[in-house]
Amino acid sequence: QVQLVQSGAEMKKPGASVKVSCKASGYTFSNYALHWVRQAPGQRLEWMGWINAGNGNTKYSQNFQDRVTITRDTSASTAYMELTSLRSEDTAVYYCARSGPSNWDFDYWGQGTLVTVSS
Amino acid sequence: DIVMTQSPLSLPVTPGEPASISCRSSQSLLHSNGYNYLNWYLQKPGQSPQLLIFLGSNRASGVPDRFSGSGSGTDFTLKISGVEAEDVGVYYCKQALQTPFTFGPGTTVDIK
């Protein structure tokens, strides 16, 4: 069965960086895309960007353009999301989600990773 | 960016009764291929979101047939024909037409 398993909760200080992983199993990793979506407390879901797991192409939301980097390791069937220059407003649950390479329906989601930014 | 709105934001329901959620987009989600690029997701308490509806009206795998999606262009509706206790949670619409993909604010469905 398809599973996306994310790394554990993180606590960071303002200005630091965080890197969250998303390990995929149960399907051919390179045939799909992986997206990152975050949910700050009391806020709506916010799409951050995606990576084509096959060719590594990425696209980011302008809201995060200069601070987010999404990568993947096909040998480990794992995608990563790194967010730099953290501020308190980045405190949120971060999700990875799978879609087809040319459709944008998020059919499987990771369990979420809580990132807390606090001094 | 395409702005998504939903109404109502809170929906108390009686088990067995129907429920309806409206979603509107600031731009048409109708692609030239004839499909509406609109998803519905349900986030149950303490869980990750799950896909309910894709392309406006298609149920995702395993989704009960009491859920149905309709609409076109900028106006969409999710209907539950008879709400069950397991349907409580926050329902989100999302436009999948163009990046950045954007979500509605969510509609919280709970039992009266």
Image (cartoon, rainbow, N blue to C red):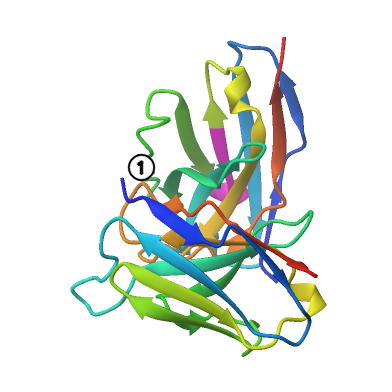
* Residue drawn 54% across the image and 26% down it: A83
Q: Residue at x 71, y 86 (%)?
A: B17
User: Is A75 colored magenta in this rendering?
Assistant: yes
Location of residue A75 with respect to A40 vertically, above or below: below
Tag 1: residue type? Lys
Image coordinates for residue B31, horizontal then vertical, percent:
23, 70
Q: Does B31 sit above or below residue A13?
A: below
The answer to which quarter of the image holds residue B111 is bottom right
Above or below residue B77? Residue B82 is below
Instruction: Read off the chain for label 1.
Output: A
Q: Quadrant of the N terminus of chain A?
A: bottom right
Q: Quadrant of the C terminus of chain A?
A: top right
* Residue B77 image position (x, y, % from top left): 46, 75
* Foreground residue among B83 and A85: B83
Please tell me which residue lies in front, B71 or A67.
B71
How many residues crowd mark 1 within 10 Å: few (<14), some (14–19), many (20+)? Answer: some
